Image: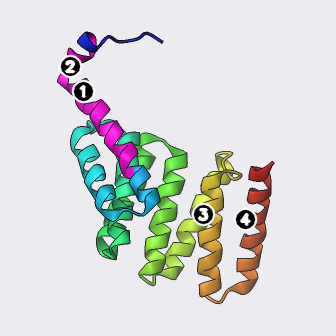
């Protein structure tokens, strides 16, 4: 890799500088989300979305997923739902199946919190079909999706189906531990 001197870095076009700052903010938002810090997640997500170009769909979807987390952390489920729906669409537009799975899983979680269990189950089923068709059925994202799906089925008192999904989850976890 070619190293850039400090003088050359100072001469980056503003659009490149903004994109780099936006991507850094998206990473910070994602890290704050994993810490459960709603304020920083919100701050960095918004900064990322402000700086990132519209066509940088994968990074924008990452920031949007984190923004949905910020809303969810503070109980703003309507806003979380809307932002997470946008994250799913941005991930699809980017052609990023892995991020689509993560964004869809988080959308299903929000719908579960809203009591929309049937729709949340439907999303989980559709996304596991996508994961299987894309060769991603043995990934961490698929495992998270299966965990959410199994919990929702149990809440819906569909225990037989929940046990089937739980077995699928166990298979994914076993594969990931190898």
Q: Are marks 4 and 3 in contact (CB under 8 Å)?
A: no
Query: What segment is highlighted magenta in the picture?
Result: 8-29
Badge 4 or badge 1: first in the primary sequence:
1
Mark 2–mark 1 Cα distance, whole angstroms, equals 6 Å
Mark 4–mark 3 Cα distance, whole angstroms, equals 9 Å
* Residue under the point 44% across and 79% down: 113
Q: Which residue is mark 2?
A: 13
Q: Is residue 23 magenta?
A: yes
Relative placement, left or right, of 132 versus 99 is: right
- Closer to viewer: mark 4 or mark 2: 2
Q: Secondary structure at mark 2?
A: loop
Mark 3–mark 1 Cα distance, whole angstroms, equals 36 Å
Q: Is residue 115 magenta?
A: no
Q: Are marks 4 and 1 in contact (CB under 8 Å)?
A: no
Q: Position of residue 89 (x, y in %)?
A: 39, 53
| Towards the viewer: 41 or 172 | 41
* Residue under the point 32% across and 10% down: 5
Mark 2 residue crowding within 10 angstroms, few (<14) / some (14–19) / many (20+): few
* Residue under the point 47% across and 41% down: 95
């Amino acid at each position: 890799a070619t190293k850039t001197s400090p003088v050359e870095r100072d001469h980056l076009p503003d659009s490149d500088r903004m994109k780099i700052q936006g991507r850094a903010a998206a990473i910070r938002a994602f890290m704050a989300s994993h810490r459960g810090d709603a304020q920083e997640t919100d701050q960095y997500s918004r900064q990322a979305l402000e700086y990132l170009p519209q066509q940088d769909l994968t990074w924008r979807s990452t920031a949007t997923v984190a923004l949905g987390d910020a809303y969810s952390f503070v109980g703003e489920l309507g806003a979380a739902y809307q932002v997470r729906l946008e994250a799913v669409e941005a991930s699809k537009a980017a052609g990023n199946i892995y991020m689509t799975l993560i964004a869809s899983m988080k959308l299903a979680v929000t719908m579960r919190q809203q009591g929309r269990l049937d729709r949340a189950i439907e999303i989980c089923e559709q996304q596991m079909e996508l994961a299987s068709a894309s060769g991603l059925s043995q990934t961490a994202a698929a495992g998270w999706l299966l965990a959410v799906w199994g919990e929702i089925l149990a809440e819906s008192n569909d225990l037989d189906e929940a046990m089937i999904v739980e077995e699928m989850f166990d298979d994914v976890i076993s594969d990931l531990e190898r």
